[in-house]
């Protein structure tokens, strides 16, 4: 298959390939990580809740024996005992189950970077074919999973055997012991065993997750041909985007050039900046910037102005203020009313005949 894709997979996966795999639900995951996190959360919850659980258990036992010691027992009594047991069992078990579920979801989210894609849940009919699954039994991945399971069992046995051996020899099992003392001893023993098992699972989970990361990286490796094809696709997308931006600039430029002949005056810097202003007393509340540009665009505005005999006025401070603070298609700022009014008044006075022939109403 590698040959059909263009040769040996020697190239590192691109970010696009990794993201597509993540969207499809294909990422490095280790069930041992979830197991270790769930056990850690369970031990933490039990450490906090064990005193309350024991107290609840004792109260339940006392109440149950008190009911059973009554001379007359009917069906309602047994029903009450049953529901009382369900209530107390739920109080003890439900918090642990809730923490386990939340921890499982959290561990899955951590491994998937909390990215949920609907494409991972799309039905794939090839999964119904049992033959790939049978073949998978003999693949390297299945052998690794078996090895991890054996390693996990060995680590757990090795970590807990010394504790169990010591507990069996404890005098608490060979002499009369108070019930509360026995419960405390069992709780401490369970906590010790749980912590040792957790340490072993953490080691196994770290090793397994490291292997899964390496295996996933190997699966994502690309051939040189695949990298070239992806680069071509990216370059094609960039070319399309570039062409779109180019056409958009051309349209804006055509619109920009079409507005300049409508201007009443061009205010310049005089060489680096040009701002085209238009004022229609009947439809505008204030003069409006129809076009502005710097350097080459400033020169282009002046060329069009000369072509259409539009007055060009040199005023460096006003040109800089108009260029910096006023946008094309919008009216000028109130702070510039006086300065622009003087420029327009001069232009109208000098070019009164030109504006009269155009039918434009001049300010009084």
Image (cartoon, rainbow, N blue to C red):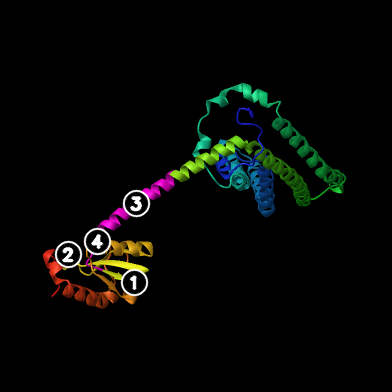
Q: At which x and y percent is residue 322?
A: 32, 71
Q: What number is the disc on residue 250?
A: 3
Quadrant in the picture for residue 136: top right
- The residues colored magenta run 240-265
Label 2 vs 4, first from the N-terminus: 2
Quadrant for residue 346, please give it. Answer: bottom left
Whether residue 254 is in magenta: the answer is yes
- In the shown orientation, is residue 169 left or right of residue 273? right
State how far apart marks 3 and 1 are (Cα): 26 Å
> In terms of secondary structure, what is the magenta stretch mainly?
helix
Q: Position of residue 134 (x, y in %)?
A: 66, 23
Q: Earlier in the sequence, mark 3 or mark 2?
A: 3
For the residues labelled 2 and 4, the Cα–Cα distance comes to: 26 Å
Between marks 4 and 1, how big is the CA–CA gap? 18 Å
Image location (x, y in percent) of residue 106? 60, 47
Identify which residue, 108 or 310, lies in the foreground: 310
Whichever of labels 4 and 1 marks the residue nearer the N terminus, that label is: 1
In terms of secondary structure, where does tag 2 sit?
loop
Q: Secondary structure at mark 4?
A: helix
Q: Which residue has dot 4 on it?
A: 307
Decide: is 306 above or below 142: below
**Quadrant in which the N terminus is drawn:** top right
Residue 283: numbered disc? 2
In reply to whether residue 217 is colored magenta, the answer given is: no
Q: Earlier in the sequence, mark 2 or mark 1?
A: 1
Alpha carbons under labels 2 and 1: distance apart = 30 Å
Asked if the residue under mark 3 is in contact with the one under mark 4, i.e. CB atoms within 8 Å, the reply is: no
């Amino acid at each position: 298959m590698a040959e059909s894709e263009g040769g040996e997979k020697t190239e590192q996966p691109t970010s696009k390939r990794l993201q597509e795999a993540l969207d499809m639900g294909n990422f490095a995951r280790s069930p041992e990580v979830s197991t270790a996190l769930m056990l850690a959360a369970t031990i933490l919850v039990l450490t906090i809740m064990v005193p309350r659980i024991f107290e609840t258990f004792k109260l339940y036992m006392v109440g149950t024996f008190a009911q059973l010691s009554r001379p007359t027992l009917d069906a309602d009594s047994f029903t009450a005992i049953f529901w009382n047991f369900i209530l107390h069992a739920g109080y003890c078990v439900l918090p642990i189950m809730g923490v386990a579920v939340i921890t499982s979801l959290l561990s899955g989210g951590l491994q998937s970077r909390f990215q949920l894609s609907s494409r991972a849940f799309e039905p794939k009919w090839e999964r119904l074919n049992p033959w790939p699954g049978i073949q998978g039994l003999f693949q390297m991945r299945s052998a690794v999973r078996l090895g991890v399971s054996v390693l996990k069992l060995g680590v757990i046995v090795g970590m807990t055997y010394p504790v169990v051996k010591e507990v069996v020899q404890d005098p608490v099992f060979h002499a009369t012991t108070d019930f509360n003392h026995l419960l405390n001893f069992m709780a401490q023993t369970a906590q010790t065993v749980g912590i040792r098992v957790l340490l072993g699972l953490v080691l196994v989970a770290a090793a397994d997750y490291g292997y899964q990361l390496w295996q996933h990286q190997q699966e994502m490796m690309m051939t040189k041909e695949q990298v070239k094809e992806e680069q071509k696709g990216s370059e094609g997308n960039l070319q399309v985007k570039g062409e779109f931006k180019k056409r958009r600039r051309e349209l804006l430029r055509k619109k920009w050039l079409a507005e300049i002949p409508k201007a009443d005056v061009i205010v310049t810097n005089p060489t680096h900046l040009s701002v085209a202003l238009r004022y229609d007393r009947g439809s505008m509340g204030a003069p409006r910037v129809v076009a502005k540009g710097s350097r080459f665009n400033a020169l282009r505005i002046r060329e069009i102005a000369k072509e259409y005999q539009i007055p060009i006025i040199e005023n460096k401070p006003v040109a800089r203020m108009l260029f910096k603070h006023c946008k094309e298609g919008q009216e000028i700022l109130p702070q510039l009313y006086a300065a622009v009014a003087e420029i327009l008044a001069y232009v109208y006075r000098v070019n009164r005949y030109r504006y009269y022939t155009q039918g434009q109403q001049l300010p009084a």
